[in-house]
Image: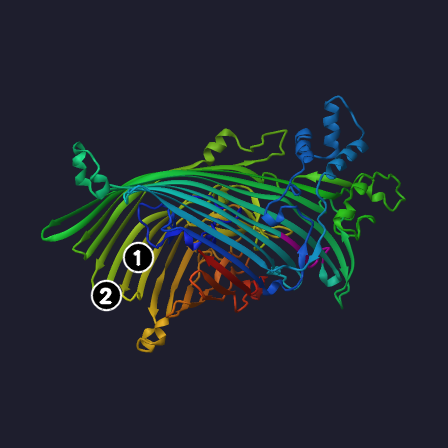
Amino acid sequence: VVPSPDLTRNVLPLDIFPAEIIDALSVQKGYSPDMPAAFGGGAIDIRTKAIPEDAQLTVKLNTGWNSNSDDDGFTYPGGSDDRWGKDDGTRQIPQAIVDGIQMYRGSFAPLRIQTVAAAAGEPISFETAQMMNRELATSLNRDVDFESKNLPADFEIEGTGGYRWYLGEDWELGFLAVGGYNNNWRNRNRTLRNVQEPDGSYAESQRTINSVSLTAGMNAGLRFTEDHEISWHQLFLRNSEDEASSTVNCRAGQYNDCSTGVQERLNDIRFEQRDLNVTQFIGEHTLGDATLSRLPEWLGFLEAFRGTSAEWFYSKSKAETDLPNEVRAKYVETFDQSTGEILTSDIRNIQNAVVFQYSGLDDRVETWGGEVTLPLTGVSWDMNWDLEISGGGSYNSKGRSYQQTVLGLGTFDQSFSMGGPGCPAVSGLPVSEAFSDANLLRLDGDPFNPQACYDQELILGIGQFGTESYGAGQTTNAGFGKIDLLVDETWRLMAGARWEDFTQVSVPIDYLNFSGQRIPLSVEQIAESVYSDDAWYPAVSLTYIRPQFWSDEFQLRLAWSKTVAYPDIREVSASTYIDPLTEARVRGNPDLVPSDLKNYELRSEWFWDSGDNLSVSLFYKDLKAPIETVQGGATEDNILFTFVNAESGEVYGAEFEGLKSLGFLSGGGWSDAFFVAGNATFSDSEVNIPVAPGVGNLTNQKRRLTQQSKWVVNAQLGYDSFSGKWGATLVYNAFGPRIFYAGIDGNGDAYEQTFNSLDFVGSWFPTEHLSLKLRLKNILNDKTTIKQTNTLDDNVTVLEQDVGTTFLFDVRYEL
């Protein structure tokens, strides 16, 4: 169990694992008690090698470009370590601000500064307090003006190395190391539209994102015969995004009504550094021939337990997400409606004309556990049987702290707060000049001076929504038992149960509250907010095995299980964050409870010796209190999402999966080099969401589940030359429209539209050690699109985002 390095989603990038260090990869679509009970419909188990088979050294270089990145993009002055995805301190919250928060007890208002000074026996004038406020503002990094940049080509380098030593006849020692670096630039333009007034209320963004990824890993293992192995695994992952975007924001009937030739422009920078560190120790032990032959005679009774295996693990991981100095500068512009030419561009005359936000997440997970398996064989009633009895347990502990500080820099005078012409010295200037040290420290005092807007007007403020910070914890204790019985190679029964004790709590924190409680909850309220429950999660499956039934091997399996979906900590915290795709505010719900699932499946599988296979399955899931994303209303700037427990829900459908060689097309000739593979799922669902506090007026209380598509297709056409020097794969992925968020106030549900993804990979192996690869992504140049029907029955594209076609070229050398 590892924490997600992404602040807003539970993800782990799978491309951080080079193929050279993968020992085993399995996909399990049915639940079994040896797995965590938080199981929805599938799990991918990736195990990395600790001891390589032979000495190995691999180096790979990659370059390429994206079709949307041919044009220039935006950038801004950053730090000296940006190329490594790390801020060098340029963007960090200034120490003067940190000290000021403590000194002035969570407020920078001149009156608060006066009060603190008076309490210390050093009374000051209001003008002096104003100057002290502005001196704090000079510590902010205001060098955030945009520059045009010719976007460079992608660059990636990856290396893997390992070795194995034989220490006598029985001992082996080995290691595997991996390192990778990736740097790419992308233009990701996006359009957001208001569903009710799409022509008058919209936002068009030009966005440039510089993504940097770093991967470093070291695995080491010690093996004694084939029976015992202890390994150490260390993984470091960094994934950073540096975004600069300029957004034209129009709202019908507001100060930025574009139909009148006035628009708001928002210039944003957002640097997000995500680091994940994982340390794990694993032990695997088997009571095999090598071990039994070395045991003393008095332990001879262990012969009865031959083949018994034990596995244990201990893991400690930490995810840190740092968003230093997110900046938003707000301008009001006038433009020529016939040509679109910008006539004037003024910083808005409001207190938070420029917003500086500092956020940090620290997420720590500790987990350990083990499992023992006892194999037994015998003959009963003329039937041969093989039985495995296994049991074990685990412990997971997760702690998270999130802190956010928001500062606003602008003018105290609200007379032009609806976007009229700003201060003469502020209007038309970039941020670095409008809020230069000279301007911030000016107290002119002459009402007839054109610079007089600096007199008692420029001010630094702090705080935004209140309790945006929080602390949270989550623990899970688990134990399980399972039997796996095979009778006459024909019938297989798996049955068992898992017990889990789950506890979770999330506490809001207001770091700026010095006059009252920083935790705005009493001890009793905190105790009441703790969710704790324990339950059993059983699973049973019966498999019928019959060779030569339309194939070389045939299996028919009927399975039933109970599982759970726990709410994530971010979903139960009462904090607010911004969804990176829709720019909507997302707020957690402390009242969420876990969802119970009952899973039913009937699966038939055919396997041929040639490697061809086909599976067909029917599935049904009964959901109790499923967690759904809904709109919680709207704000002046954007919509608000939150999470609720629905009353009930269900999912049902059919899945088809298979692989087929195309040799039959030529009777064993040229077509033997081709194969097709893929899967297709056809399903439907229904969820019932009652009216609840904090939830908007839902248009459809009964609807499909969020993010559930009626169909999903993955298809692959592959080619492997007979000489082994050429290979190619064409992959197509698509999904049916799925609800992205539920509509309110008579508006329909918003559907993410089908994204048709067509990718190509071509490989050439000119020598034993050298390989070349060409990759094309999103060949059809499809876009991410969300559509929603409004109360007038108009189908509105509320979001459209460019993705572009990516061309990549790899060179790989393996020793």
Q: Is residue 246 magenta?
A: yes
The chosen color scheme is: rainbow
Q: Is residue 439 magenta?
A: no
The CA distance from mark 2 to mark 1 is 23 Å
Mark 1, secondary structure of its residue? strand
Which residue bears the numbered disc 1? 601
Quarter-of-image position of residue 618: bottom left
Q: Position of residue 750 (x, y in %)?
A: 53, 60
Mark 2, secondary structure of its residue? loop
Q: Amino acid at mark 2?
A: Asp
Is 798 above or below relative to 84?
Answer: below
Q: Position of residue 192 (x, y in %)?
A: 61, 59
In the image, which disc is placed on residue 552? Answer: 2
Left or right of residue 102, residue 438 in this image: right
Count of residue discs: 2
Which residue lies most toward the left here? 381
Residue 296 versus residue 718: which sits nearer the camera?
296
Which residue lies most toward the right here? 448
Question: What's the magenta region?
Answer: 243-256
For disc 2, the neighbor class at 10 Å (few under 14, some 14 to 19, many from 20) is some
Q: Position of residue 40 (x, y in %)?
A: 38, 51
Quarter-of-image position of residue 666: bottom left
